[in-house]
Image (tube, rainbow, N blue to C red):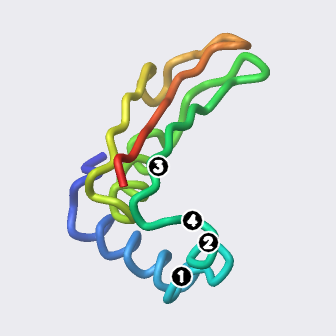
Amino acid sequence: MDWDSQAITALIRQALAEDVGTGDATCAATIPECATARARILAREAVVCAGVPLAGRIFCALDPQMKIEALCKDGENAEAGSDPVEWQTDG
């Protein structure tokens, strides 16, 4: 799958425009623009990783400075308690 294709990029833009629109008023009012964040996806059960590249593209569409580290590839198994994906943004 070519996750960098124009079709995927257009689909992400369309979905975000539909879902996020001009933004969230609560977030805009409570989270400073210079805020940083770090997050992990934690597997509570054994799982097969799927959609990791697409999730990364979506987060980067929202914040091009986003750093994503996928610790497993699509189709790989992740054990319960593992964190197969983590990401962070510096604002």
Which residue is painted at 21% across and 61% down in the image? 5
43 to 39, vertically: above or below: above
52 left or right of 26 in image: left
Q: Earlier in the sequence, mark 4 or mark 1?
A: 1
**In the image, residue 37 lies at what x, y percent?**
49, 44
Answer whether labels 2 and 1 touch (C-beta < 8 Å): yes
Which residue is painted at 50% across and 29% down in the image? 85
Three-letter amino acid code of the residue under disc 3: Ala
Three-letter amino acid code of the residue under disc 1: Gly
Answer whether labels 3 and 4 touch (C-beta < 8 Å): no
Three-letter amino acid code of the residue under disc 4: Ile
Q: CA distance from mark 2 to mark 1?
A: 8 Å
Q: CA distance from mark 1 to mark 3?
A: 19 Å
Answer whether labels 2 and 4 touch (C-beta < 8 Å): yes
**In the image, residue 1 lies at what x, y percent?**
31, 46
Residue ID for mark 3: 55
Q: Residues within 10 Å of mark 4 (few under 14, many from 20)?
A: few
Q: CA distance from mark 2 to mark 3?
A: 21 Å
Eye-nearest disc, 2 or 3: 2
Eye-nearest disc, 4 or 1: 4
Query: Which of the labelled discs sits on residue 31, or is there none?
Result: 4
69 to 81, vertically: above or below: below
Secondary structure state at the residue bearing disc 3: helix
Q: CA distance from mark 2 to mark 4?
A: 5 Å
Residue ID for mark 2: 27
Answer whether labels 4 and 1 touch (C-beta < 8 Å): no
Q: Earlier in the sequence, mark 1 or mark 3?
A: 1
Q: Earlier in the sequence, mark 3 or mark 4?
A: 4
Residue ID for mark 1: 23
Eye-nearest disc, 2 or 1: 2
**In the image, residue 63 lies at what x, y percent?**
35, 60
